[in-house]
Image (cartoon, grey):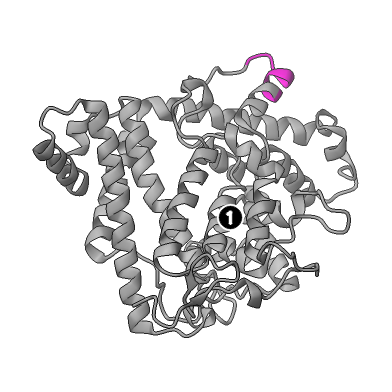
Amino acid sequence: MHEAGAFMAIDGSSPRAPYACDPAQSRGRLHAEPPSTTRSAFRRDCDRIIHSTAFRRLKHKTQVFVFDEGDHYRTRLTHTLEVAQVARALARALSLDEDLAEALALAHDLGHPPFGHAGERALDECLKAFGGFDHNAQTLRVVTVLERHYPTFDGLNLTWETLEGLVKHNGPLTDKEGRPLGRYRQRRVPGTIVSYARAHDLQLWSFAGAEAQIAAVADDIAYDAHDIDDGLRAELFSLDDIAAVALPGKIIGDIGASYPRLDESRVVHELIRRLIGLLIEDVVAETGRRLEALAPRSADAVRQAAAAVAAFSPAVGAADRAIKAFLEPRMYRHARVMRVMDQAAGVIKDLFARYSAHPDALPAEWREGLAAAAAPARARRIADFIAGMTDRYALAEHARLFDSTPELR
């Protein structure tokens, strides 16, 4: 269905459906630039993200396990690369723009601070009086303000389509009257997003394009697969434990029927391989059904739809929720993980308090203009500095400023 009416991409690589985002018809960049003669606008976005400082730092940022716990666990970087692979596979199957899907996957975690969600919660608490900390808003801040490589503008000057996808990949943020939706009903849309949208209207009331939606589902697929893999590797739970969850249990049963004497490590690899494949196939089928029913003739028709087009089927969506419900107590809130993450959160809070009380502890470039700034701007600047840290740098800074630093293992 999704190939009907498709047309050839500008690089000739694959057909693109009429509802795909077309780089030749991009709404452009905040700062006008001449087009490339060799790359599409979305390919340039990918390349800018890959060459950014924030992207390199993902190598030493926690996914679930901090770097001292072993070399085989996922980091923010390896997670990001896995999301990008899944997003490209989905885009290819659905005749969407692969480069845009990849750009969104590559950039989606750039705003995460060190130490994973524990670091985010700690910074949110530190900034409670100043609007809090939101990693999606911080991602926008990274790519529009904090990356400073170009002579005439701050940020990466990404296309409108990439920016709207980063902000809205989980759905609209407001209604058409500007009233916050979803999780922002309780805490308002972050100021970073609101202020940027005034200059470069991201249509916060609409869905993002299909490429952004599949990048968000790709994130879910990668989480389900690699967190099962890492949890088994860390011995937080066993194959018998995860086999009690319906979908992984069925896959494990099928593997056992086909290969009754297969050693456990190969069973795990086959489980993860089959799980990813099954989830991708389900998203392609369900998204195809939704697109067929909607029959959009443009990317804007996808944005203005009443519901998301990219999703799991109801049955697999329930299986996805069951996997997450299993992982929540067995992995994310496991006593071993929580002990390390609580210590990590303490490191973040210590750093924020020290820099706030003694700005001279900051590097010179981060102190510039800080004394004259109002309290909210000072707090945000300090949070920007901390959020950009790797786990290792945060611990090194803590050791420089305090007499005792936890080992986090």
Residue 211 location in percent, x, y? 50, 66
Task: Check the image and report above or below for 325 versus 335.
Answer: below
The reply, left or right, for residue 393 in relation to residue 338 is right
Residue in the foreground of this view, choosing between 307 and 31: 31
Residues drawn in magenta? 397-404
The reply, left or right, for residue 240 in relation to residue 61 is left
Residue in the foreground of this view, choosing between 99 and 188: 99
Q: Which residue is mark 1?
A: 136
Amino acid type shown at disc 1: Asn
**Does 204 lie within the magenta span?**
no
Whether residue 332 can be seen here? yes
Task: Check the image and report above or below for 324 versus 394.
Answer: below
**Does 403 lie within the magenta span?**
yes
Label 1, secondary structure: give it.
helix
Image quarter in which the N terminus is found: bottom left
Residue at screen point 21% across, 44% down: 248
Residue 206 location in percent, x, y? 53, 76
Task: Check the image and report above or below for 356 versus 13.
Answer: above
Residue at screen point 30% across, 51% down: 277
Task: Check the image and report above or below for 25 versus 262.
Answer: below
Label 1 neighbour load within 10 Å: few <14, some 14-19, many 20+: many
Q: Quadrant of residue 100?
A: bottom right
